[in-house]
């Protein structure tokens, strides 16, 4: 998803437009996570970029999208750019630290 969300509409209030954009983003993420994973992958990872325009978009974490939308709302802007690209990923196995030392007891 590469989209500039325009929040100005003659009949819909801007607060409702912000909520609609949040819902659209959540719906897209859920749809992407339901897709079949390629072999060798454990989960869908997302590369995200957010900014006032597509030229000044910066890389962010998926969990920070809501904070950035709230920031745009507080600054009173009427649009923002969001890019979310899904990619398959694999979890790395944690290394076993070995048996617990008895000196720690």
Image (cartoon, grey):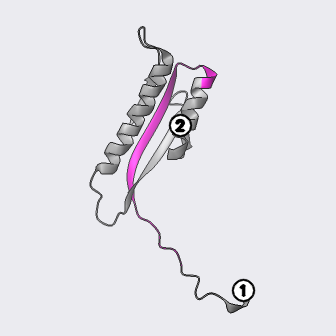
Q: Position of residue 57 (x, y in %)?
A: 54, 35
Crowding near the residue tagged with mark 1, few <14, some 14–19, many ≥20 C-alpha atoms within 10 Å = few
- Relative to 48, say whether 80 is above or below: above
Q: Position of residue 61 (x, y in %)?
A: 54, 46
**Of marks 1 and 2, which one's residue comes earlier in the chain?**
2
Vertical comparison of 29 with 22: above or below: below
- In the image, 85 versus 42, the foreground residue is 42
Q: Quadrant of residue 101?
A: bottom right
Which residue is the extreme one toward the front?
105
| Gap between marks 1 and 2 measured at Cα | 43 Å
Nearest to viewer (mark 1 / mark 2): 1
- What residue is shown at x 40% (from left), y 38% (from top)? 26
Position of 39 compared to 64: left or right? Answer: left
Dot 1 corresponds to which residue? Answer: 104
Secondary element at image label 2:
helix
Camera-side residue of 43 and 16: 16
Q: Which residues are magenta?
A: 74-95
Identify whether 26 is placed above or below 98. Answer: above
Left or right: 75 with respect to 48?
Answer: right
Indicate left or right for 48 with 76 as reference: left
Q: Are marks 1 and 2 in contact (CB under 8 Å)?
A: no
Q: Is residue 90 magenta?
A: yes
Q: Position of residue 80 (x, y in %)?
A: 51, 27
Residue at the image position 54 percent from the left and 31 percent from the top: 69
86 and 18: which one is in front? Answer: 18
Q: Secondary structure at mark 1?
A: helix
Task: Determine the residue positioned at 35% across, 44% down.
Answer: 30
Query: What residue do we see at 62% from left, 87% from top?
Result: 100
Quarter in which the N terminus is drawn: top left
Residue 53 drawn in magenta: no
Extreme residue toward the bottom, this view: 102
Instruction: Name the residue tied to disc 2.
Output: 66
């Amino acid at each position: 998803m590469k989209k500039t969300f325009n929040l100005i509409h003659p009949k819909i209030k801007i607060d409702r437009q912000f909520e609609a954009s949040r819902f659209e983003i959540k719906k897209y993420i859920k749809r992407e996570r339901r897709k079949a994973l390629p072999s060798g992958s454990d989960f869908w990872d997302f590369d995200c970029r957010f900014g006032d325009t597509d030229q000044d978009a910066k890389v962010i974490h998926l969990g920070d999208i809501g904070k950035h939308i709230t920031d745009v709302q507080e600054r009173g802007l009427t649009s923002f750019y969001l890019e979310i690209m899904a990619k398959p990923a694999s979890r790395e196995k944690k290394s076993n630290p070995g048996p617990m030392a008895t000196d720690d007891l």
